[in-house]
Amino acid sequence: MANRMSRGEFVALVAMMFATIAFSIDSMLPALPKIGAQLSPDDVNKAQLILTSFVLGLGVGTFFTGPLSDAFGRKPVIYVGSALYILSAAVAWASSSLEVLLIARIFQGVGCSAPRVVAMAIIRDLYSGREMARIVSIAMMIFTLVPAIAPMLGAGLIALTGWRGIFASFMLFSLITIVWMALRLPEPLAVENRRPLRLPLMIDAAKQMVTHPTVRISIMVQTLCLGMLFTMLVMVQPIYDVVHNSADSFPFWFGFVALMSGSASLLNAALVVRLGMRRIVTWVLGAQILFTVAVIALNSMDLSSTLSFALFVSWQTALFFMAGMTMGNLNTIAMEPMGHIAGMAASVIGAISTVLAAAIAAPIGLLFDGSIAPLAFGILIMCTLGFGLMLHMGRIEDRVPA
């Protein structure tokens, strides 16, 4: 392409596209009590659905945005997705009922899938090999800073404008991104390189993936790991507020945890060549089982408020760290046998795991009863199932001749 952008500017733009998801989820966390009190006073716990409804829409959109961008070009799909994201944010901003807000968040998630998924395709269009890996790594390093600051940004916006101001910031954030892209980035996918959109091919790709044993198990475990992460996200603010009486300091603790757990990807990169992806995922899930059992046992004792709070923050950090040590490895395991349909496979994996994880997290979040018990037992069940599935994957691999 005619390179109007420097490499640094391109990385910054891609990182901003990636960050749309984290900003759309994490900045909402401080707003949940106020939205629940205003739009669902009889059951403030329903405000958690604001997060899972967005994730549900994101998963649905992920299935289509990659293939659509292959057929119609990268920039048009981002334009349409961003327009849907902005319009949905405007509807959410004006909502007078929780039901309308939740519907708007579903469509906002669908729209958000476009910049997130297509940004990766753009990197693939313009770079390859080690240079592509380098671009993605730098962009993801910038992306990891967003969960650390998003709750603080959300809390600041609430203080200045009320909770509706967060949705106005979503509109502004997305508008800046697409204007920047429109002015500075030429269309990276030439017309002659586009592929027609064929639904039978998408269905056939999904069938190939769910019938391959290793791929199927990897998607199931990825779903459980995402389910644990989403369940923690939807319940973490109420736990800080109700259980630990730390609502005011929640954005700062969340940022601290996000920064601490951000080192997981670096550790994984150092270990994965030596230990292998399956072994790392299995060990990390096993460690999470032990940690969660310890949390449940210790919380049944009469701990001081300081010790109880420190235990929860440590467990939250360990869970976020687990996500960093498992998600990339599981995605790689699933993609490895699917090289002949790599683009379609990436969309299918993302869509299935995200939608099912949201379906798991939503009902567990609604069980919040003023304690960490629903969260702890839900995560214990999910990581135990994931651990068992990874052991089964190992037995399958042992039966396959080298």
Image: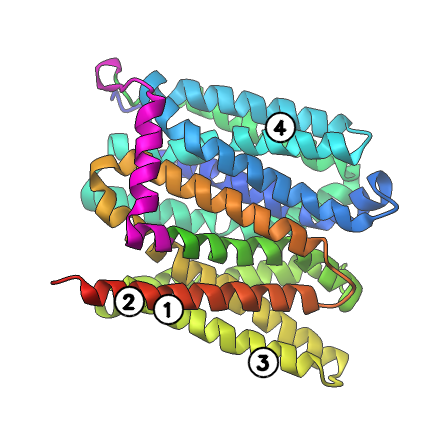
Give the label, 1 or 2, closer to the camera.
2
Q: Is residue 313 magenta?
A: no
In the image, the segment drawn in magenta is: 191-218
Please give the residue where the numbered disc 4 appears in the rendered image: 171
Q: Residue at x 35, y 37 (%)?
A: 206
The amino acid type of the residue labelled 2 equals Gly
Give the label, 2 or 3, closer to the camera.
2
Q: Is residue 7 visible?
A: no
> Around disc 2, counting alpha carbons within 10 Å, would you say few (fewer than 14), some (14 to 19), or many (20 or more)?
some
The amino acid type of the residue labelled 4 equals Met
Q: Is residue 335 left or right of residue 160?
A: left
> Around disc 3, counting alpha carbons within 10 Å, would you say few (fewer than 14), some (14 to 19), or many (20 or more)?
some
Please give the residue where the numbered disc 3 appears in the rendered image: 294
Q: Residue at x 61, y 58 (%)?
A: 232
| C-alpha separation, residue under disc 2 versus residue under disc 3 | 27 Å
Query: Please, what secondary structure does the residue beneath circle 3 have?
Result: helix
